[in-house]
Image (cartoon, rainbow, N blue to C red):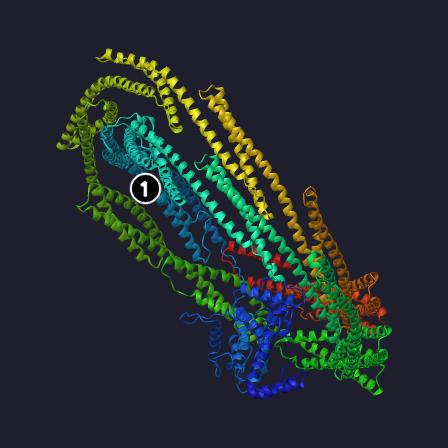
Amino acid sequence: MSGSGGTHGPSGRTFETHRIAVLQDGTYSLTIISSLDNHTVRERERVQKKTFTKWCNSHLSKVSLRVNDLFTDLCDGRLLLKLLEVLSGDKWAKPSKGTMRFHQLENNEKVFSYLRHAKIKVENMGPEDIVDGNPRLILGLIWTIILRFQIQDITFETDDEEKKSAKEALLLWSQRRTKGYPSVKVTNFTSSWSDGLAFACLIHKHRPDLIEMDGMSKETPKENLTLAFDLAESQLGIPKLLDVEDVNVEFPDEKSIMTYVANYYHTFAKMKMGDVSSKRIVKMISFLQECEGFQQEYHRLASSLLDWIDQTIETLGNREFPNILSGVQNLLSDFAKYRTQEKPPKYTEKGDLEVLFYNLNAKLRSQSQPGFTPEEGKLISDVNERWSQLEESEHAREVALREELLRLERLERMAEKFDKKASMRANWLIENHKLVSQDNFGVGMAAVEAAKKKHEAIQTDIKAYESRVKTVVDMATTLESEQYWGIDRIKEDLEKVLELWEVLLHALVGRRQRLDMTYAYTKALQDVNDLIDYLDDLKAQLSSSDYGRHLGDVDILLQQHSQLEAEYNGAQPRIVQALDVPEDMLQMKGEEESSLADCCTTLRSTVADVDELLAMRKHNLVTSQHLHKFYEDVDNEDDWIDEQIKIISATQFGSDLPTVSSLHKHHELFGVEVNNHANIVEEVCEQGKYLIGCGNFDSDNIEIRMHQLQEHYDKLCALCKQRNSRLLEVVSFQTYLSDADEILNWLLDMEKMVQSEDIGKDEATAQLLLKKQKTLEDEITGYEPMITGLKKQQDKLSSEDRLLPITREKQDTIEARYDMVVRQARSRKQYLVFAYSMFLLYREAGGVKSWILEKETLLESIRAPEEYADADVVERRFESFLPELETYEYRIEEVTDLGQQLISKSHPKSEEIEEIIAEITDLWDALNDQVENKRIELISTISLQQFKNSIQYCVNWINCKAKALLAIRSGDVANIDTKIRTVELIEKELLLLGDKVQELEGEVEKHSRLTEEERQEIAESVNKVSLQWTELNNLLAEKQKQLAATNKLRIFLTDIDSFLLWEEETLIQASSTELAVGIARVDQKITLHAEMRTEIETFEENYQSLLENGSSLQEEHVTGAPLISDKLETLQDRWSQIAEQWNVRAKLLQQCRELQLLKRDVKLAESTLDKQDEVITEMKSSDLTPEQRIKKLQALEKLSVLADNKLDTLQTTADNLLVEKEHYAEEEIKELVESLTARHSENTASTETAEDAIREAKRLQKFIDDATELTLWLKERADSLSEESLRDPATYPLLAKHHEALTGELTNNETLLEQLKNEGLEINSLESNPLVVSNVGELQAAWDNLSQLLEEKDAALQTAEKGRRATEKLQNLAVLVSDMTAALQSTDTGFEPTAAKQINKKYEVLSSEIDGLELVCEDIPEVEAEEVGSVMAQKDDIKSRFSELQIPLAEKQKKVGEKENLREFNRMCGDEEQYLKEKLLSLENKNLGQSLMEVEMLVAKHKVFLSDLDKHEPAYQATLDFGKELITAEHYGSSIIESRIEQLVAQWDDMVGRASVREKDLSENNLSQKFYFECTEAESYLKEIAHLITTDMPTDEAAAEVMLAKHKTVQTSIEDYNERIKSLKDMLDTLSEHPLVTRFNNRFNFITDAYQNLDASAKKRRKVLEDSYNLFHFNREVTELSSYITNKEVVARSNDLGRDYEHVQVLESKFQEFYMELTTIGQGRVDELFSSGEQLLENDHTMSSEIKSSIGNVENKWRDLLSLADARKSILAGSVELHKYHRDVTVLTSRIQAADASIPSDLGQDVVTVQALQRKHMSMSHDTQAIHPQVELLSEESSRLQDLYPGARAEGVSEQQTSLESHWTRLQDHLKLRKEALLSAAALFNFLRTANQLIQWATNMRKQFVSAPIGTSVSAVDLQVVQHHDLKSEMDDRV
């Protein structure tokens, strides 16, 4: 709605007052807020809401959606998601279709997820804010979306290229567009826009034809705003987001203004761009044919040149060079011929091709034709690229050849260097081998250590030399990897060097081994001597005869002995290590006085002596310790027994129970202590027996002390038993007296309690007393076993105590008093029960009275509502009261039943009880009557209020829509689309309201309880509504007619203005003369220029379209035709200028790019020339060595080649540029090329001068170096041969290898010698040089000298080596035989196992050496020396001595073996005897355990003992088997072995027997202890469980559930314990033969009886608790189900049939859910209740009558509810059908009307437009045919509904169907008329087109007749005659 006001704009306060008044006039109401600031905020939110709603609708209309209320329609998130999809053009998440809150949250979460994905910051809000409809946050969210999708992309660059923000850019754009208009100054987005002039300026700036600024003034802001908004909407298509009254204030809303202004910006920006495309007409075909020949010639030349380039590149790319220096030099020569002979003609051909290409393109450009573009792969750029690739391949070929040449030269030099180094390494290795071959180690430990250090130094030097050898290997590897041609010779030299290296390393390792052996020998000898000294000192200490005078002294001596043993054991590893000396070391002879073998023998004997002394002294000390320990133990036990006898002799027994019990406990502890000392006494006696058995020197005294100790202990035991017996009798008597006194005191207390007259003051106190009385009775009953037990206790007293007077008197008194207490307790209980029942009746009756009075007051407060809004509250209040009333009925019955029960039991107050029951019954009946009356009153009143409310709703809606229609101005084209959509929406809603009016008319008769005045008032209201509805229909039809004629003119002017703006900007860009510096920038500008061309071609189609549309508008003589003509003329002029300026700038940019490429190449060439200058300057320096000069020369050659290539390429490029005469930088190009050419020539001359001199100097220097190196090597080898000596035979093999290696080196270097001689002669022949001659002569002399000396040394070495080998072999064999003989003559056969093993090992080694010696003697060669006879004699002597050693060797081995076996058997027997002795000691313990834990520990220990015995049995059996084997082998000690075996077997059998007996005793004792333990545990358990079974009853369901759960746990525990009872029975069966079996049976029977009693009590208690819980649960279910049925009846009684189809669908959906819940969940609850009630009845529950009554009430209520639900279901189904029909008819009618309205009246302007309109009409006719089936379907549905629902509803259906069919018939008629009109127009335009063509043809013919000149010759005249006849024939054909 829009408000009205005066001509002047109101102020802010006036606006607010006016706005409030307008709102109050309508159907809305506002509460005026006192605070102006708060109201301003609310007003701003209202304006923003309106603006943002329109903005959203402007975008959502594209998908046929609309927002009515921004704060409610966006809550579900669906419209927000669709809005984002429309704005972004992306398909995002599919919204959820549900209407629940979580569905809405899910949709809104998707919205926020999309915003986060699009990097749109949304802070301080979430999905829940949108769902809750938070106004401020929803407005903030929409504003964020507007900023992102409409305002953020707005950019505006200032003159200083500064980027502005979106808001600043939009403001700056507005300022620029309104600049120059008077009275308009835009500084913000609030006050600057309130007068409307700024909006008008924006429109006038872009479309001056739409608005006249001269007539506008600030004094008329509303008119300005209205005009601007309407023009923007009607002419520019800008949605009308703002209302005039919202902007015409002092400070309009900034965000709303920005949103609306942004629409202006985007609309005007789109006017600049359009999708156009242009086509150019191809002319000058004859010229193109002329150029075709040039193009073919170009293709031929290009193909030939490219083929040659490809072949050449392939040839130059070959890298398979010969692996020899001369071959590479030949390839370099061929490459030079290619560059000088083959390449230049092709370069000329390439230039001709470029000239042809540029000439051809020049001709095409002169005629404004597109340039010639060769086919792919043959462009000039392709040729240049391939030529560049050729030059690159050429350069790469040259570089590769030169690198290969340098590589081969480098390999030659490396091979020479390798030969020199290999020779030097070989000489060094030979010299060091001599040094390593010498063994001078010295004598003594210090000398040997010094020799080791010296050897390590030598070894370090040799290891350090390994890197030098590796250098030679690396050089050879490099030569091999680079495929050096002489690699075979290199490998031979390398193998010789490596062989010498391996020989040296082997010699070094051998010397190290010999040195280590010498060091080990010296060290072992020193260690043995140190050990001998230590053992001698130890023997002196062990020889002492002091064994102690008492036990403490003996312990000190044992500790000292243990320390000595520990020290000795610690020295054992050293002794073993010292004796474990290899045999070869024992045979070694040192410089010391005694040998290592002698020292080892001395050490073994000393060790044996020390072992014997250690064992002997330890045995004596242990024996002395045992004796002194026995005497000390006997003395201690005697003293303890004397002390205990004194204590036990006391005669006091106490006078009361505590004293006697204390004395008895002390005596029990004393008895345990005495029993424990029995083991101690036994252990002391066993110790004495052991000492006697060992033959101790004091055996007689030991036996006497043992007898005295045993007698003394027996006396103590007898006294202890006698005192214990008397203490037990006294304890029993005192216990009886104490129990009797305690029972008497308890009986006195009970008498006081049962005689009390207190019955309580109320129900609580009475119930408490009753509980206490029950507890008291239970206590009295439970005390009876104690009375009986006291009698039994009296019978068990001793005869003396039982006959005392005090005993009989106490027993009689107790029995008499107990009987009296039992009788009094029963009487008091009955009295308390009557009192509690009466108190309970008083409380229940009083509660019922109070509740009934309270509900009566409540019913009086429930009154019929005066307003319909309060009806629902009153109805719910009354309905909530009814379930409570029904629920409380059962309580009335309870009170009545309680009173009847008391009367039936003859209660003392029966009359008072009957009066209470009667009073309650009367009150209850009165309350039910009052409820029924109130129900009837409320139903009548609420129904009337609902009817009135419906009437008021219809009146308000009609008034609102009427105002909306009146506010639409149909003559204004602004926002015309929005107005049409608004009218259509009102029309649809109006149809739905008609059904509502008909329903109201039909409901008037239903209200039968109304008075005549009320009925008349309602009828008048309904008639008024019907009349208003008819008037609104008429108003709507009038508005539709007015709006149909308004929307036709807005397109052409908008399009042409946008295109002119684009032409203006494009022409400025095309006319620019700005050029760039740098290739990248030039390329960027060329790319932009090409994009401009594409854009121009794209806009050409739009250009032609504008021309055609403008012409058609001029022909139609529309308003503004002169303006159209001017715009068309401007359009054509600018279009031609754009094409011309674009071609000029394209040529200029291409030339600029070529110039930049040339400058780049010039810079690269200059850098190469600069490097050349640097190298030439450095070469002129005198400080350079020849090698450095050579490197500089190589670098200079590479630079020269590179410079040549670059200069050639540069010259070619410059020539190509200069061919084009009009290049703007021609002089600059020439100057650059000439300067570079001059510099290159100077550098080339300087390079050639320096090359020759350097090459000759290099050759001479190389010759001198090689000759000097070889001469030095020859002299070194000659000196080393001269120094060799043959005095030491050990060096003969090394010398032989040295000579062999030297001979190989000479052979390898002979070739090098010849090469150096030839090189020297060649150098000398070119230029005589004395230095060359002297070097050659010196080299030859050194060679001859070394060869002669080597031959002499080889002959002498061979002669000396033969004699050395024979003598050395014989000497070694003689020494070996002597050592063997000495070993066999030794009488030592071993004195301990370790020594015996060592002797056997030594004999085995000697035997193997004898076998080897025979073989050696057979292999001694015949020597060629002077002492041949002496050598042969030594050989025979060795053989005879070897043969004599065989027999003594065998005897020695046998003797040593037998002695070793005997020693081993004795050791094994000793180990077994010691083991059996230790085990027998553990079996002597007679203790079987006094408790279960102690017995189990003893059993476990015995199992370990038996396991250990089983594990040890194989060792025992192995000992017996070994002894039997020795006896069988007839060992010399067989008798001793046999006796030891018999003794060992007897000891083993004895131990096994004792172990079996102890195992049986322990098993029996363990079983009995387990039984006792289990019985004790069972008794404790049964006592604990018995206390858990109580008689308490629950007060409610929760208490019953808790008590039942606890009792189930207890009962489960009792049932599970039955297994324990059974296991106890099984255990008892196993003890059937036990001596105490009777005692075991009594104990078990007692436990079984107690368990059975406990189980029966638990079952009984569970039954009581289950009944109580079931009843509580059933009553709760009845209450809850009754409340559930009452609530559901409220829903089933609803009369709401829905306002429209959507509403009734919602109602039906909710009712279906309700009905489904009713038939599933509700029915299930009812069935479950009936099932539980029947089960309680089957179980004969005590409250069966109450249960039956509850079931009946629930069943009746449920049956009523189901009938109400079925009725509601059928009513809703009919309502759905009717509403659906109305909706479908309304939608289809709107569709037919829209189709009818969309039929245009335009008949076209020519044939083409008429044909387009015919096609459009056919499509529309086809679309409308799809409506016909729907019309027929609705007709059938109408007939069906009229039959089902007769009366008013059937009439409404009939009227709607008639209206639909009339609209459909009218649409068909309009389509038919439209078709006929289009056919007539097509025929007319066809005729006019034919006529225009004939007129144009006739005009052309006339021009030819008039303008043709008359010929001046006969031939010309004849030609004219022929032409004239042709024209005549054409005229005849036309006719």
Q: Quadrant of residue 1223?
A: bottom left
Residue 987 appears left or right of 1542: right
Residue 401 appears left or right of 807: left
Residue at point 57%, 48% (across, down): 717
- Asked if residue 1608 shows in the view, the reply is no
Under mark 1, the amino acid is Val
Q: Position of residue 642 (x, y in %)?
A: 51, 50
Q: Quadrant of residue 403?
A: top left
Residue 422 appears left or right of 607: left
Residue beneath disc 1: 399
Residue 548 appears left or right of 233: left
938 relative to 1412, above or below:
below
* Placement of the N terminus among the 4 image quadrants: bottom right
Q: Position of residue 190 (x, y in %)?
A: 51, 80
Q: Position of residue 381 (x, y in %)?
A: 41, 50
1378 relative to 1813, above or below:
above
